[in-house]
Amino acid sequence: MAATHIRFDWAIKKQLRDKANYVVLEGFISELLGEVITIESILESESNPQTQDNKLNRVDILALNSAGELLLVEVQNSSENDYFQRMLFGVSTLITEYLDKGEPYSQVKKVYSINIVYFPLGQGQDY
């Protein structure tokens, strides 16, 4: 009989979106960042492309904390050669979606991009 394991990917996409489980997500992110994080809400995590040729930005969890900062949490199971560029695209798209036309750039929200990957990202001193 094969063992059944609950994957973190499933937990992040299903269980941690429930307000009753915010404390688990808050604890996880607080430990990662080394500061106390309070989740105010889980936001819509899929962008709406402006045209059919635009890329779609979909993340596992997008949360707003009590300081008004955005927390982008993504779990990636399969290797992608351009994963760093994908991370940059996701954060950049998020920043532009939360800055209204005519708003000063000083209003850009801080974004934490938390990526949990099940593959080596490479070698280097800068990450």
Image: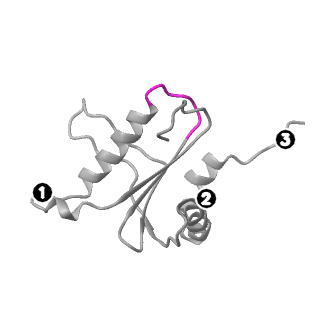
In this picture, which residue range is highlighted in magenta?
76-82
Element at label 1: loop
- Looking at this view, name the residue that lies furthest to the right: 1
**Is residue 89 something one can see in this rendering?**
yes
Report the residue marked by disc 1. Answer: 101
Tag shown at residue 15: 2
Residue appearing at x 24%, y 60% in the figure:
108
Q: Quadrant of residue 16?
A: bottom right
Please tell me whether the stretch drawn in magenta is mainly helix, strand or loop. Answer: loop
Element at label 2: helix
Among numbered discs 3 and 1, the one appearing first in the sequence: 3
Q: Nearer the viewer, residue 48 or 100?
A: 100
Residue appearing at x 24%, y 29% in the figure:
53
Residue appearing at x 80%, y 43% in the figure:
4
Report the amino acid beneath label 1: Lys
Report the amino acid beneath label 3: Ala
Residue appearing at x 49%, y 73% in the figure:
38
Say above or below: 88 vs 18. Answer: above
